[in-house]
Amino acid sequence: MNSIYCMKNITILVFTLIILAQSLTAQSKVKSKKRGTTISVNQNTDLKLAQQYFQKGEYEKATPLFQKLYEGSPTNSYNYRNYLKCLVFQKKFDESQELIKKHFKKKKNDPSMFIDMGYVFRQQEQPEKAEEQFNKAIGKLSNNNANEARSMASIFNQLEEPEYVAKAYLKGRELTGDPLAFAYELAMTYKKKGDYPNMISSYLDYVQKTPQKVQQLKNEFQGLMKMEKYKDVIQSALYKKVQKYPNELIFPELLVWFFVQEKDFDSAFIQVKALDKRLGENGMRVFDLAQSALIENQFDASIDAYQYVIDKGIDNPMYVNARQALVGAKMKRLQYDNEYNDEDLRVLEQDFLSMLDEFGRNEKTTGTMKRLSHLYANYIFDLDKAIAILEEIIDMPNAQKQMRARSKLDLGDYYIMKGDIWEST
């Protein structure tokens, strides 16, 4: 009996000890968790305070905070770099170098160590030593590692070393074997340096690799083209690209765009005509250029471009549009220049009549007919012919309502000019 009683007591005691142990373990975990949370909160508080001091330029106050954060997490590059900057800004150069050596003790060939050393020398106004360290860093870049080059360039950028940002990218380009690598990054770097010729060249590399970004290039170039000295640089760079990469369409197209921006439509016509012939096109891009030239009152270039499309033959889908546009351009030139003689008027009249003989007088040629009536009424002063043409348009059942309405208004004016007030109403 006593044996059974003892066994019960032992079982109860063991069970109690297990519960007690579980309770203590749980409490320990809670305390540990709270302690971790407390540490995390303290770190965040220190970081925010350190950042505030740093931004205000109070480096003496920021230094111990970043030091504490760095020592608590030596692999955190943000804390390390800001700690280093605090020391440098206080001209504590010996301490700065000791920090760098300590940080890179186990990775002495890390390129970042040479960059940081160079940074300290730069702040000490020892440019030769700084550049020696920077060049060592670039020499540590390895083959086929674009990310390594990009990371190094980023560090140089943070240190306001644009020349070495460019060198890092160029070395990375060389090592990866891609002549267009880092084109955009280089364009932005050269822009920051104020090295616009190299920026232009790099931007052209960029659109060669990513043609869909051409509008971005145009936006940048338009700003540069406001400065006369860079217009020739852009034009020369484009010609070089056209010659070096004859199969890349984007460069002759950009050259056309450049000439249009400069309102040099004669040069643009030469380029766009070459493109049309090379690609075996139907003259659409030449026709579009003629339209742009006409808007800018560049009549010779416009007329030459329309004529080029016409010369492609009657079977060309752009033939009719070009024929109509050509006589329209000649009419606009006459109105704009206001310098003409009777022979000029007769030649233009024959151009209109020849086109109407070829395509007929119908709802598709009412625009040409109306322009001819304007020529008769206001330049040749043959009101009867002008009136007859307008009446013909008005009587066309398939003519557009708007065209017929405008023709009625002109007809009223011409009757008044003729002195027939009653017919004008």
Image (cartoon, rainbow, N blue to C red):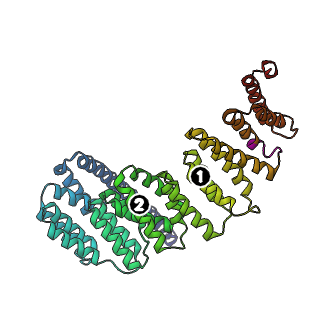
Residue at numbered disc 2: 234
Picture residue at 14% right of the left edge, 54% below the top: 90
Picture residue at 23% right of the left edge, 71% below the top: 134
C-alpha separation, residue under disc 1 versus residue under disc 2: 25 Å
Secondary structure mostly taken by the magenta-highlighted segment of the chain: loop
Picture residue at 78% right of the left edge, 45% below the top: 365
Q: Eyeballing the image, is 156 above or below 227?
A: below
Name the spot of residue 333 as percent of width and height, x first: 59, 43
* Stretch of the chain drawn in magenta: 361-368
Q: Which residue lies furthest to the front in this view?
A: 342
**Residue 400 appears in the figure:** yes
* Residue 302, disc: 1
Neighbor class of circle 1 (other Cα within 10 Å; few <14, some 14-19, many 20+) is many
Picture residue at 35% right of the left edge, 64% below the top: 198
Q: Eyeballing the image, is 27 above or below 58?
A: below
**Residue 74 appears in the figure:** no
Determine whether the residue tagged by mark 2 lies in a helix, strand or loop.
Answer: helix
Tell me the quadrant of the picture where the C terminus can be found. Answer: top right
Q: Which of 191 and 63 is in front in this view?
A: 191
Q: Residue furthest top?
A: 422
Determine whether the residue tagged by mark 1 lies in a helix, strand or loop.
Answer: helix
Neighbor class of circle 2 (other Cα within 10 Å; few <14, some 14-19, many 20+) is many
Q: Eyeballing the image, is 54 above or below 377?
A: below
Name the spot of residue 6 as percent of width and height, x first: 47, 69
